[in-house]
Image (cartoon, rainbow, N blue to C red):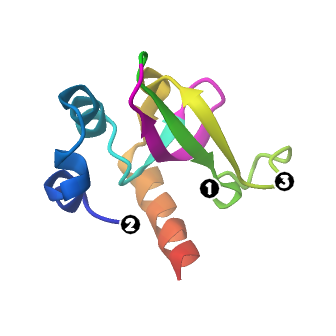
Amino acid sequence: MMTETELFESDWFTSRPLEIQAVIRKWPGTRPWLLKTTNQIVTIYSYTEGTPITVTVDVLRLLNPCLLCLLFSRRVFGIDPNDLLALDSSVEAQAMVLLKKEEN
């Protein structure tokens, strides 16, 4: 997973429309988020460059082990970015450790 600095300096980011850049700056895909409508920890997979701007998120089973109904990870599209909340720093740190283990 790249850092926010790497993201904001990437050719991909600078080639996005300004409206999308603003959304990405507010909700970068470099960290996990809490989806307040379901109370699940998610990561941003992509941004939709339409109207309205939405995000596609991954609901990862490894980040939500206490949810018995979550038997597998899944991708959900059409999420309003305003439904994403920043995690407190200790929960975010734990989630990042799990994500790094998953990458390896």
Q: Residue 15 location in percent, x, y? A: 20, 45
Q: Residue 93 location in percent, x, y? A: 41, 60
> Amino acid under label 1?
Leu
In the image, 81 versus 101, the foreground residue is: 81
Range covered by the magenta-colored residues = 35-50
Residue at 52% from the left image edge and 75% from the top image edge: 103
> Amino acid under label 3?
Leu
Residue 94 vertical position relative to residue 28 in the rendered view, above or below: below
Q: Quadrant of the N terminus?
A: bottom left
Q: Residue 9 location in percent, x, y? A: 14, 56
The CA distance from mark 2 to mark 1 is: 15 Å
The CA distance from mark 3 to mark 2 is: 24 Å
What residue sits right under mark 3 in the picture?
Answer: 71
Q: Residue 7 location in percent, x, y? A: 24, 56
Residue at 57% from the left image edge and 27% from the top image edge: 78
The first of marks 2 and 1 along the sequence is: 2
The first of marks 3 and 1 along the sequence is: 1
What residue sits right under mark 1 in the picture?
Answer: 63
